[in-house]
Image (cartoon, helix red, strand yellow):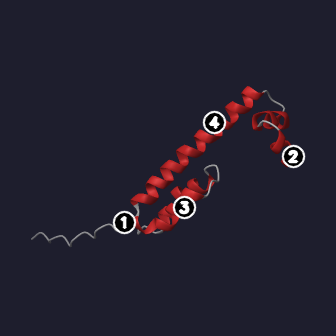
Amino acid sequence: MVLEDLATGNVYEIISSYLGVSVGTAMVILAVISIWALIWKGFALWKAAANKKSVTWFIILLVVNTVGILEILYIYVFSEMGRKKKIMPEKSPSKKKK
């Protein structure tokens, strides 16, 4: 039934009827989701482009749309996996006072 509705009607009217809200509200919901996804996608692509080892991630993030979920995972999980922990330099032995 959904495919038939999509083929014959306006997407906003279909979404609004399934959500039980007005067409204007459906448009606002879709706009908010789109902006949310665009912000996360831009940030993740920026971070992947800065890391030369993340070419594969850059392509995946560019092609696949997951409404920000994959982008958030890349930013906070996968981009941090390849980084080495910063090692604190050891203190040199102090000279003994006489």
Q: Nearer the viewer, mark 1 or mark 2?
A: 2
The amino acid sitting under disc 2 is Glu
Question: In the rendered image, which residue does mark 3 sit on?
Answer: 77
Crowding at mark 3 (Cα within 10 Å: few <14, some 14-19, many 20+): few
**Separation (CA) of disc 1 from disc 4:** 38 Å
Q: Nearer the viewer, mark 2 or mark 4?
A: 2
Could one spot residue 73 in this view of the protein? no
* Residue pictured at 9% horizontal, 71% vertical: 98
Give whichever of discs 2 and 4 has the lower sequence position: 2
- Element under disc 1: loop
Question: In the rendered image, which residue does mark 2 sit on?
Answer: 4
Q: Residue furthest right?
A: 1
Mark sitting on residue 86: 1
Question: In the rendered image, which residue does mark 4 sit on?
Answer: 32
**Separation (CA) of disc 1 from disc 2:** 57 Å
Q: Nearer the viewer, mark 3 or mark 1?
A: 3
The reply to whether the C-beta atoms of the residues labelled 2 and 4 are less than 8 Å apart is no
The amino acid sitting under disc 3 is Val
Q: Residue furthest left?
A: 98
Location of residue 22 by image quarter:
top right
Location of residue 34 by image quarter:
top right
